[in-house]
Amino acid sequence: MQVPLVSRIHAGGGRIAVSLHADKSVLSELSSAYPLKLLSPSNQDATAIVYLLTYGGGLVGGDEVNLRVDVGSGARLILLSQGTTKVFKTRPGRRLASIRVEHSAVASRDDNAPFTTKQSFDFHLADNGLLLLLPEPLTCFRDAFYNQYQRFHIQDNASAVILDWITSGRLALGEDWAFSHHHSVNEIFHNGRRIAKDVILLENTTELNLKIPSRSLQERLRPYSCYAMLILVGPQVQSIITAITHKYDQLSVFKTRSPAPLIWSVSPIDAGKAGVIIRVAGMESEAVKEWLKDALRGLERIIGVDVYRRAFP
Amino acid sequence: MYDDSEAEAYIMLLLSDSNLPTGSFVASSGLESYVKHGFASSSPGADVSTVNFVRDSLESYSRSAIPFVSDAHRAVAQFATNLGESTIMGKDGDEGYNDILKILTEIDELYQVMTLNHVARRASMSQGVALLTLYSKGFSQPPSLSAFSGEEPQEQETRIRKLVDLFKLKVRKEEVSGHLPICWGVLTAALGLSLERSQYLHLFLHARSLLSASVRLNDLGPYGAQQILLHAVRPLVAAEAARCRDLQTGLYVNPSEDFDETTLGPANTWPLGEILAGRHDLQHSRIFNS
């Protein structure tokens, strides 16, 4: 069965372009196709706001999202989501959507494909542009199989704040790192040169052999149920980098009997010239969110209190 | 003349010496920080918590470092093979040096940008350059010893030695970082160790250095560490070596191969270990460098 070319190109595709017009960041392009949905509140200001959503509140095996984002010279864009991005192994309840039916018919030829969910994002930031990628955390449900690839092409004095975080599942249902596979790549290029590539693979692996049972994800990641990766890069966020680094350098660790409810680390990328990578782990995702809200508060001065509140109410 | 497998076994014995920079007198790869932060306390005993750390650390290290060991090893082994051919053809080898140095630099640069933890980067660079020094100082044959080996160094050996010296010079000039997995791949290929043995030994040494660190931290006794090494670590190293055998950096993928980065590329599998390793320098008192 052949998938019609049109639906194959457009399913899950999206495009955002922001350019600067007289101090306002204007969305010159905003388009998306099922299951991806892009929404922008009508008010135009110095910072353009776009919400990344998915139909039915989540992604399922076989879904593929491809988004390209262009932030023009001097423009600012904040990308948010509403609620966690949920990844299901299969869509709960059957939905009537012709594209889906065509997709699964093709995918079923491959053993793994029907269960793999893929998101691929390409960001292009022109000189002095600013991208704030501050979505809610990703939640992979039981047996979900998820691959994410994010590439950031940064020109000259463009800046970016990149947040990529994940929770351990639906705690109410007893899920604690019960998904099957999560592979996330964040790759950053500055003027074409790769300056950082973070690849995290979380997998409940099959047994190595009969003698040794594998360490489950839950065993490896406990006692934490939320892990965040935050990258700050570029001149517009230098004061935030300085503040966070200063706070980190003041920490002093003495021997403790049990793990702290939240821990974080900071490392410079590209020998400290370009930016930092921060990792946070917390027993509660709300605590991680509070930590992020506090650490990034300096953004209020750049984008304003109202826009900042959209990311961190 | 001795046969290849005997030569390989002998090289493996030499490289397993815990006095070499491959051993762990300075690096704990995050174990000291893990214990300090209270992560060992939840286990019933120090042996269980140490084995758990070894397992999680080894799995993440093999998935992130073995692709680089393998690509560097393959590149140098390929260079050695081509050398043999080019000398037959009477070609000058200088062009070959530039090409192989460019490849090793690219592999090393990718490791540098993928190792997003300054403590691990620092430890990896100091162990890497120590290995290159070990090769040029500890494995070269002075004229006074030529009577024992009964052989003159062959042309191929001389040229591989020159390659390692050129690479080391680039590290000294800070043109390249010289990370441990890349230097290990270069060293073992230069010594004629097969890729499979090189991967296996690298993982074994990582696990053993964690156990030595545990002894030095007074969490395990030396006999207890030896028991773990013999009974627990052996199947773990074998399993990881088997699992990571075909991993690649992705830089030199044969176009005919179907390279899937999510299954065959380098990745960090233990973000908790990454945070704890990064926090090493925050410890109020510490005995290791990493």
Image (spheres, helix red, strand yellow):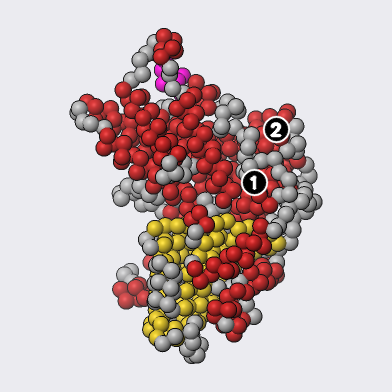
Tell me the SS state at disc 1: loop
Q: Nearer the viewer, residue A99 or A221?
A: A221
Tell me the mark number nearer the camera, choosing from 2 and 1.
1
Residue tagged 2: B225
Decide whether residue B255 is among the magenta residues. no
Where on the picture, by quarter, is residue B108? top left
Q: Is the C terminus of chain B in the top left, top right, bottom left or bottom right quadrant?
A: top right
Graded by Cα atoms within 10 Å as few (under 14), some (14 to 19) or many (20 or more), the crowding at tag 1 reads many
Considering only order in the chain, which callout, 1 or 2, is on the residue closer to the N terminus? Answer: 1
Give amino acid for label 2.
Answer: Ala
Asked if A88 appears above or below A203 in the picture, the reply is below
Taking A109 as reference, is B88 left or right? left
Would you say residue A216 is visible in this rendering?
no
**Which residue occupies 39% across, 67% down?**
A155
Taking A221 as reference, is A125 left or right? left
Q: Nearer the viewer, residue A23 or B240?
A: A23
Q: Chain of mark 2?
A: B
Instruction: State the image coordinates of residue A16 (x, y, percent, origin top left).
Output: 41, 78
Graded by Cα atoms within 10 Å as few (under 14), some (14 to 19) or many (20 or more), the crowding at tag 2 reads many
Chain part drawn in magenta: B1-8
Tell me the SS state at disc 2: helix
Decide whether residue B3 is among the magenta residues. yes
Residue tagged 1: B30
Asked if A19 appears above or below B263 in the picture, the reply is below
**Circles 2, 1 touching at the beta carbon (< 8 Å):** no
Instruction: State the image coordinates of residue B82 (x, y, percent, origin top left).
Output: 28, 32
Taking A262 as reference, is A145 left or right? left
**Which residue occupies 67% across, 68% down?**
A291
